[in-house]
Image (cartoon, helix red, strand yellow):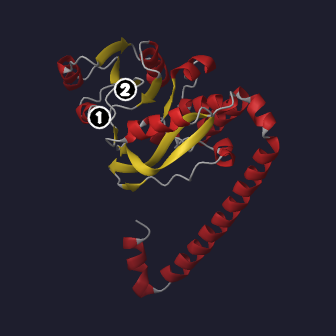
Amino acid sequence: MNKVSVIMPCYNDGEYIEEAISSVFSQTYKNVELIIIDDGSDNEHTLDVLGRITGPNIKIVKTNRARPAGARNAGIAKATGKYILPLDADDKIEPDYIEKAVRVLENDESIGVVYCYAELFGERSGKWDLPDYSLDKMLLDNIVFVTALFHREDWEKVGGFNTRMQHGMEDYDFWLSIIEIGKGVYQIPEVLFHYRIKPSSRTTEFLTNSGIVKETYQDIYRQHPQLYEKYKDQYALVLRDALIDQLFINKTLQEGILILERIKRIPVLKSIVKKFIMK
């Protein structure tokens, strides 16, 4: 059994990390090492929890606010596994995720990335509404979460996670780099990953600033000129489709707002609309 290195950055996630670790060592695939990267945690509870974590297949690496991309790179540099699986310290995986993902990589050399369906938990629950994988969709936006299995040697080939991306999306950039070297992506059609929703996170903060979002996607486009040149026709068509979809969504929203405005003019319904719909 080829070794899998699970890479777990941690910044003040002491409240959740033991649950994440438990999911790693509950795997049906047993040749697993866990590398925890303490990225400058200063929370007393987190430091206490990290101080108690020991085990023959656990390494703890310390970095000083290298952020997720830098922390993952530091952990992978210390990894001894053939395969790498990033897992954030507040998330968890199903017991058979690694076994099923390894099987895909070992049965098909053309595949470079394996992920699955996912569910949300924490502040919100339910299936994570991501589209099924396709190259068209991937050229437009990131539809692969960071907890996906890949070859360590591919990480070396593409130069690791891009630490220059200040606002996130380094996983999107990384997957595009692997696609750029000719590797495919496979999605296991089962829920094997659980993504925690917290009241505030780097992702929620990122999505509140349209200027930063635009700048980040422009950077990603410029960082993969060969990929976007190779698939320029597909990219143009998927962009056109996305624009048309957005126009129809906006039209539907505008029609809904007009209906609400008319309802609000009816006195008996005005208070109901304000209480249950416009709150």
Tell me the quarter of the image containing the C terminus.
Answer: bottom left
Disc 1 target residue: 20
Return the disc, 2 or 1, that comes first in the chain's sequence.
2
Could you say which disc has been placed on residue 219 in the image?
none
Q: Residues within 10 Å of mark 1 (few under 14, many from 20)?
A: some
Horizontal side of 229 relative to 1 (left or right) equals: right
Per the model, the C-alpha gap separating discs 2 and 1 is 9 Å
Horizontal side of 120 relative to 245 (left or right) equals: left
Residue 120: horizontal and vertical position, in percent?
A: 38, 50
Which of the 4 quarters of the picture holds residue 36?
top left
Residue 208: horizontal and vertical position, in percent?
A: 52, 43
Q: Residue 189 or 59: which is nearer the viewer?
A: 189
Tell me the quarter of the image containing the N terminus.
Answer: top left
Q: Residues within 10 Å of mark 2 (few under 14, many from 20)?
A: many
Residue 23 against residue 84 in the figure, above or below = below
Q: Amino acid type of disc 1?
A: Ala
Which of the 4 quarters of the picture holds residue 53?
top left
Answer whether labels 2 and 1 touch (C-beta < 8 Å): yes
Identify the residue shown where x is 43% and y is 29%: 86
Identify the residue shown where x is 76% and y is 29%: 225
Q: Amino acid type of disc 2?
A: Met
Residue 56 against residue 234 in the figure, above or below = above
Element under disc 2? strand
Residue 278: horizontal and vertical position, in percent?
A: 44, 68
Element under disc 1? helix
Identify the residue shown where x is 53% and y is 36%: 107
Residue 37: horizontal and vertical position, in percent?
A: 36, 19
Count of numbered badges drawn on the protein? 2
Disc 2 target residue: 8
Note whether residue 49 is visible: yes
